[in-house]
Amino acid sequence: MTSDTSAPLTDALAAGTLVLDGGLSNQLGAAGHDLSDELWSARLLADEPEAITEAHLAYFEAGADVAITSSYQATVEGFAKRGVKRDRASELIGLSVELALDAAVESWRRGVKRPLYVAGSVGPYGAMLADGSEYRGRYGLSVAELEAFHRPRIEALDAVGPDVLALETIPDTVEAEALLRAVRGLRVPAWLSYSIAGDRTRAGQPLEEAFALAADADEIIAVGVNCCAPEDVEGAVEIAARVTGKPVVVYPNSGETWDAGARAWTGRATFTTEQVERWRAAGARLIGGCCRVGPEAITSIRRTLTR
């Protein structure tokens, strides 16, 4: 946590609803940074770390209580493809937490006097492949193989000490099982967030089964969905709250659709403040945005949740 006056995240969730940040990549892109590399925003950890701090700062100043780190696509294997050795890769993964903490401290210096938190992002295996498989899952790997893939990044994040780990955009229950095994015994708690389509994971498993995996996991302090259509969120919140009894985390996309062939977003945004009110009523306690949701939308969410 960012200050001696901050309550632990679990206590803050028990007291009310927290605002997450928005899409880190679109904020970096809006600032003119090239994210076409396979490492995506993780490339900037080595090349332009100050840009990541500025992006986090923009979201804190917009009203976010929680910043999600730039480690979504930062993995030992991914960095190895670029010739980065294992020890250096771990340093860069840890740096993602430090940069978010720096942004929180600077926010306090500028007058943002509320508790601020940092969530260490743990993206899916498919994000490292950079071939769209993160939205399909079913990679053909075992639970043990996926656990071995995720563990080095989780340990690197845990060593620096974020407030929580964000096990996010998980497309199937096999990877969820691996992540639940990988976080056992850590000092840092975690949330588990699936990428979904309708009432199923991206791989097609019913959400009741997917959320049930985390119901008895003491390390998991919240469950939910992200990187999905806003229209799919409300039903998922109700299922997650009913199946697990845990606080629910939601941060959908804007509602636009990514055209992988054209590498462009199409359609229109459908994310509204009216939806935010319904999500909270259904049990959501961490609410923010993912792809194409920027600082203005986060300010709108904060106004909705505090009025």
Image: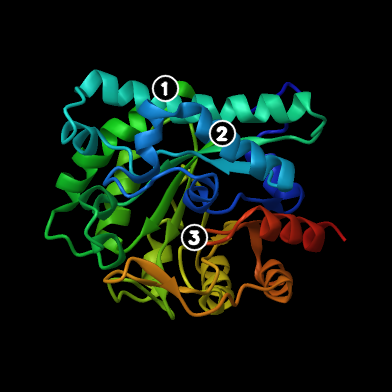
How far is disc 2 from disc 3 in space, using C-alphas? Answer: 23 Å
Distance of label 2 from label 1 (alpha carbons): 12 Å
Can you give x and y, in whole percent of width and height, for residue 195 in the image? 40, 65
Which residue lies under the disc numbered 3? 291
Between 133 and 180, the residue placed more toward the observer is 133
- Disc 1: CA contacts within 10 A as few (<14), some (14-19) or many (>=20): some
* Quarter of the image where the N terminus is located: top right
Helix, strand or loop at disc 2?
A: loop
* Nearer-N-terminus badge (3/1): 1
Number of the label disc, if any, that sits on residue 163: 2
Extreme-right residue of the structure:
307
- At 43% from the left edge and 81% from the top edge, which residue is drawn? 198
Mark 2 residue type: Asp
Work out which quarter of the rendered image holds the C terminus and state it: bottom right
Mark carried by residue 159: 1
Residue 26: x and y in percent read 51, 53
